[in-house]
Amino acid sequence: MSKLVASPEPKSLETQSAPRPELVSYPAHDADLGGGITVVRVLPLRQHRLVGPWCFFDHYGPLSFNNRKAMDVAPHPHIGLQTVSWLFDGEILHNDSLGCTSMARPGELNLMTAGQAIAHAEETPARNSGKLHGLQLWVALPDRERQRAPSFDHYKDLPVLEPGGGRVHLFMGELAGQRSKARAFSPLVGAALKFEANAKMRLPLNPAWEHALVIIDGKISLDGKQLIPGALHYLGAHRSGIELSTKAPARAVLIGGAPFEEPIIIWWNFVARTAEEIQAAREDWEQHRRFGEVKAYRGARLKAPSFIARPIAGH
Ligand code: MN
């Protein structure tokens, strides 16, 4: 873990006690998603669990392939979260236990709200571009919403900001006075940043929120410091804005939100509050209860791993 502290403000009696923004860079690690795909897992990390309500961040690709399914994640259950699927290239076919079927494509959002229970499968469709590059993110649902009925939404018409230096696709939440219409249950932001060469992009941030940046490709500097790829760059709170610069075209993702105050437990595909809830959800999946079946998927569903009472605790 490398700790990089942002340039100190001029010291005076007035600013010494004021909260300062931080910059801590945590290396991400590879994870096997099954079905032959390896991803870069940016969240959760042992040293860092949440950024606002964002509790999971996988980056996969870019992949090029012929005559094979690059992604084939068989039916599996979720509780207590929203899955946010965002593609830079290629396509993924989503099918779920509500009977929803949807093709995720670049620039469009697949948003699944698991609530009390849903199951879904994600796979490369038979007719495909031979390319795949994207993100799967999870948003933890707050306690008052996490037992809600499951739902699935596909959004095509999302805000595109032009702050200078490139374009920003705002897929979730709020940024720079714009708002994504994607259904959210906590104050948050999720945005894909695309930079031109020699860009200087300034983005206002909500200083009450915490934020993080993830480099997707290229080289990007924050306040003059280059951010390494394959890492979670945690920006902390107390920032009213950031300035990002590039020499060549590059891409990044900004996530953030109000600090999520509820302690959460993440185990397999479940976000919960207690080990008992996790065990009950696991048992319901194994016994074909609660979650329903993904009828549109051809093939066996995933089996839950053994539950070891040592789940990853939130915060
Ligand atoms: Mn899933």
Image (cartoon, grey):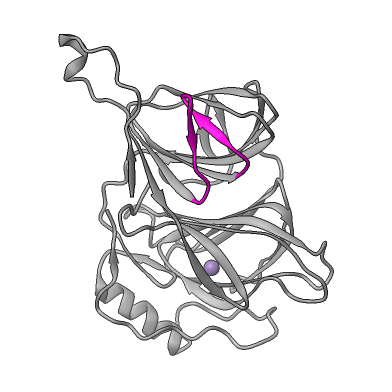
Q: Residue at x 55, y 64 (%)?
A: 39
Left or right of residue 153: residue 126: right
- Front position in the image: 229 or 268: 229
Q: Residue at x 22, y 14 (%)?
A: 15
44, above or below 94, in the image: above
Can I make out residue 72 in this image? yes
- Front position in the image: 279 or 49: 49
Q: Residue at x 41, y 27 (%)?
A: 206
| Magenta stretch: includes residue 218 | yes
| Magenta stretch: includes residue 51 | no
Left or right of residue 262: residue 251: right
- Front position in the image: 262 or 90: 90
Expressed as whole percent of the image width and height from the top left, the position of residue 169 reads 64, 37
Expressed as whole percent of the image width and height from the top left, the position of residue 306 reads 36, 86
Left or right of residue 160: residue 265: left
107, above or below 292, in the image: above
240, above or below 133, in the image: above
State the extent of the magenta-drawn residues as a range: 217-230
Rendering quarter of residue 238: top left
Expressed as whole percent of the image width and height from the top left, the position of residue 198 reads 66, 24
Rendering quarter of residue 65: bottom right
Q: Residue at x 58, y 40 (%)?
A: 252
Left or right of residue 104: residue 214: left
273, above or below 262, in the image: below
